[in-house]
Image: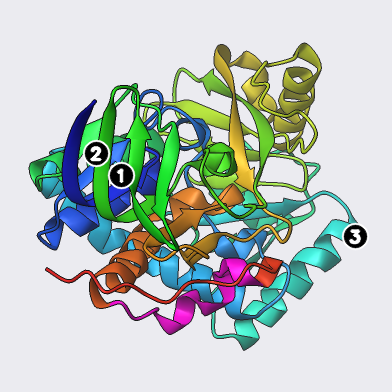
Amino acid sequence: MNSKTCDIAIIGGGIIGCGLAESLALEGLDVVLLERGVIGREASWAAAGMLAPQSEMEEPGEWFDFCLAARRCFPETVERLRDSASIDPQYRDEGMLYVAFNEDEERTLLKRAAWQRRCGVQSEILDASELARRESAVSDSIRMAVRFVEDHCLDPRLMTQAYAISARRAGADLREMTPVHRVLIDGDRVVGVELPGETIHAQSVVLAGGCWSGLIAGLPFALPIHPVKGQMLLLQCATPQFSCTLHSRNIYLVPRFDGRVIVGATEEHDAGFDKSVFAGAVSDLLSASYAVVPALREAAAAETWAGLRPGTPDRRPIMGPSPVEGLVLATGHFRNGILLAPLTAQLITEYIVSGSLPETLGPFGIERFGAASAPARKLGV
C-alpha cells in the first residue's frame, strides 16, 4: 500500500473544507484534502448563497453574534479570492427584504427588527407603498417589509471554486473521487487516514465531511449529524425582476446578475440521503414564489436539484477538538455553511496552528452532546 505524510489531512471538499485547505496552506502547512466525489458538488453546490443572519435569527445571543462576525468576513475574503483565484463570487450587497402578507407576519418582523436595533444592528421598515416603489415586481398583497441592510448574498458555487483554486495555488493537494475508508487512531491520537490503496499519515485530521461526517469508519465516538434535504429550483428571467434577495415565511428568492433566480427551499429531516426532486415540492416552491413576485410565472424553469444539509440536534455546527487528540471537527453547519466558511477557516486554522482554542468556538464543541474533548495538539509551522 502506498503512503504519504503531511501536516494536515482534511476530509471533505465542500466550502468548509476548501476554505480550511486554503487557510492552512497559507500558513505554510502541508495540506491534503480528500473529497469522496467532486469538490464543491454537495451541500455547497445546492446552497442559495444567502449571508443572512438577520433575516433568519429569532433571538439575540452568542449564536447571533457569531453569525454577524462571520458576515463581516465577506467583503475582504471575496476581494482576496478575486485576486488569488481570478474568480468573482458575485457578491451582492443590496440587502435583503423580508416581506409580510398578514398581521401575524408583520408583528413577527417588527419584533425581530426591534430586538436587532437594540443590539445595534441596522434594519429599515418599509410600508407597502415604499416597498412597491423600490421593488415594483413584488405582489400588491404584501403589507410591509423589513430591509435587512447588511444581509447579502453571493454565488456559493463560484465561492467554493475560488477557494479550491486559491488553496491549490497556495500549495494544498486537493483530491477528488477519493473516499476516506477509515480514520486511523493509535491509542488516543489520530495518526492519519486510510484510502483505497493508500495511507495518509498526518499530524492532524480535520473532519469536514458535511452530513457524511459521522459515517466514516474508525471514529470511536458518535457524531450527531444527519442529512436535512432541501429541494430547490432555478428560474431564468429575460431580465432581472428585482434587485435584492426576497424572503417570506415560505420562500426565498435570490437573484443573480443575469436574470436567474434561485428559489428555495424545503427542509426535510426524514428523507435520509435521498436527493430526488419531487413534483409536489417544486409546485409548492413555484406557488410561493408567485405569491411574492407574480411575474415569475413567465420565467423559464431552468434547473431543479436537492442538497443535503448537515444538521445537528441544536441546528448549530460542531467545531473544535474531538475526543481523539489531533482529530479536529469542522462540520454540522446546517443552513449556514456558506455564511460561516471564512470564519470557520480562520478559527480552526488558529486552533490547529497555536494549539489554543479560540474563545468564540467554545459554544460549538462536541462536548455539548456528551462527548469529552481531547487536549489540544499544537502544530505550528
Task: Identify the residue at horizontal 46%, vertical 17% (top origin).
Answer: 238
Residue 2 image offset from top left, x and y in percent: 19, 28
Q: Amino acid at mark 3?
A: Asp
> What element does badge 1 sit on?
helix
Q: Quadrant of residue 239?
A: top left
Taken as a whole, is the magenta stretch helix, strand or loop?
helix
Please state which amino acid type lies under the numbered disc 1. Answer: Cys
Looking at the picture, how far across and down is residue 208, in whole percent?
Answer: 44, 47
Residue corresponding to mark 1: 18
What secondary structure is marked by label 3? helix
> What are the residue bounds of the magenta stretch?
355-367
Q: Which mark, residue 104?
A: 3
Q: Determine whether, in the image, residue 255 is placed left or right of residue 60.
A: left
On the picture, is 93 further left or further right than 23? right
**358 in magenta:** yes
Q: Is residue 368 magenta?
A: no
The residue that appears at 64% across and 87% down in the rendered structure is: 118
Q: Residues within 10 Å of mark 3 (few under 14, many from 20)?
A: few
The label nearer to you, 1 versus 3, is 1
Name the amino acid, label 2: Ala
For label 2, the residue is 164
How much space separates mark 2 and mark 3, taking CA atoms?
A: 44 Å
Q: Circle 2 sits in a helix, a strand or a loop, which is it?
A: helix
